[in-house]
């Protein structure tokens, strides 16, 4: 009986890890379907984003589905800034890593797209500016 009680926490941990793995796999499969045909896409813990047909769309994962948070037309893009996620309007330095957001400015509007990784956000900045110049 004592040996069985010792294995019980391991069984619970195994079931919990299995359930979390299943949820992540489901999220990735939903992302593949959502991002099909996109020119540029990303999935991280802050959400998903894709560029398709000249529009940048980003979502968050809620209740087993992607819920759209906003869209931005790439042709109207004038400026992209890399901003800190939590400290208001502080721009991110080149050495900074971690969670951040891209501020998209153009057409009289400003929108923020969250990112988990600053390196990925920097590469998206370059690619979005290249796309906006090509689409003009």
Image (spheres, grey):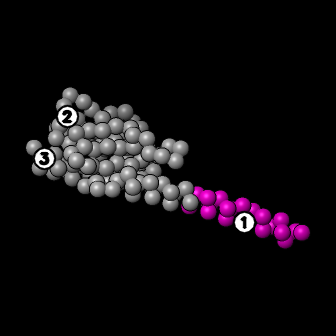
Q: Nearer the viewer, mark 1 or mark 3?
A: 3
- Residue under pointer 2: 106
Chief secondary structure of the magenta span?
Answer: helix
- How crowded pointer 3 is (Cα within 10 Å; few <14, some 14-19, many 20+) is rated as few
From the top left corner, tell me how far across and down residue 88 is, in percent: 37, 33
Q: Does the magenta segment cover residue 5?
A: yes
Q: Nearer the viewer, mark 3 or mark 2?
A: 3
Whether residues under marks 1 and 3 lie with C-beta atoms below 8 angstroms apart, the answer is: no
Image mark for residue 10: 1
Outermost residue on the bottom side: it is 3
Task: Using the image as rendered, state which of residue 25 and residue 91 is in the foreground.
Answer: 25
Q: Nearer the viewer, residue 53 or 101?
A: 53
Establish if 43 lies above or below 84.
below
Position of residue 14 in the picture relative to residue 70 (left or right): right
Quadrant position of the N terminus in the picture: bottom right
Checking the image for residue 132, the label placed there is none
Q: What's the CA distance linking mark 1 and mark 3?
A: 55 Å
Q: Are marks 3 and 2 in contact (CB under 8 Å)?
A: no
Q: Give the residue at x 88% y 68%.
A: 2
Give x and y (percent) for residue 81: 25, 41
Question: Residue 78 appears at what percent x and percent y?
Answer: 16, 38
Among numbered discs 1 and 3, the one appearing first in the sequence: 1
Specify the label residue 135 is tagged with: 3
- Start-end of magenta stretch: 1-21
Q: Which residue is at the far top? A: 108
Relative to 31, say whether 3 is above or below.
below
Which residue shows up at 34% across the image and 48% down it?
49
Secondary structure of the residue carrying tag 2 is strand
Q: CA distance from mark 3 to mark 2?
A: 14 Å
Viewport quadrant of the C terminus? top left
Label 3: element kind: helix
Q: Earlier in the sequence, mark 2 or mark 1?
A: 1
């Amino acid at each position: 009986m004592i040996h069985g009680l010792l294995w019980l926490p391991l069984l619970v941990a195994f079931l919990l890890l299995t359930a979390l793995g299943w949820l992540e796999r489901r999220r990735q499969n939903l992302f593949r379907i959502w991002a099909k045909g996109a020119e540029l896409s990303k999935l991280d813990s802050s959400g998903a984003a894709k560029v398709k047909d000249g529009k940048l769309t980003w979502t968050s994962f809620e209740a087993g589905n992607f819920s759209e948070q906003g869209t931005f037309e790439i042709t109207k893009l004038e400026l992209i800034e890399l901003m800190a996620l939590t400290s208001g309007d502080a721009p991110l330095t080149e050495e900074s890593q971690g969670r951040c957001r891209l501020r998209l400015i153009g057409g009289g509007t400003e929108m923020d797209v969250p990112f988990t990784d600053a390196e990925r956000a920097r590469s998206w900045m370059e690619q979005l500016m290249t796309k906006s110049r090509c689409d003009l």
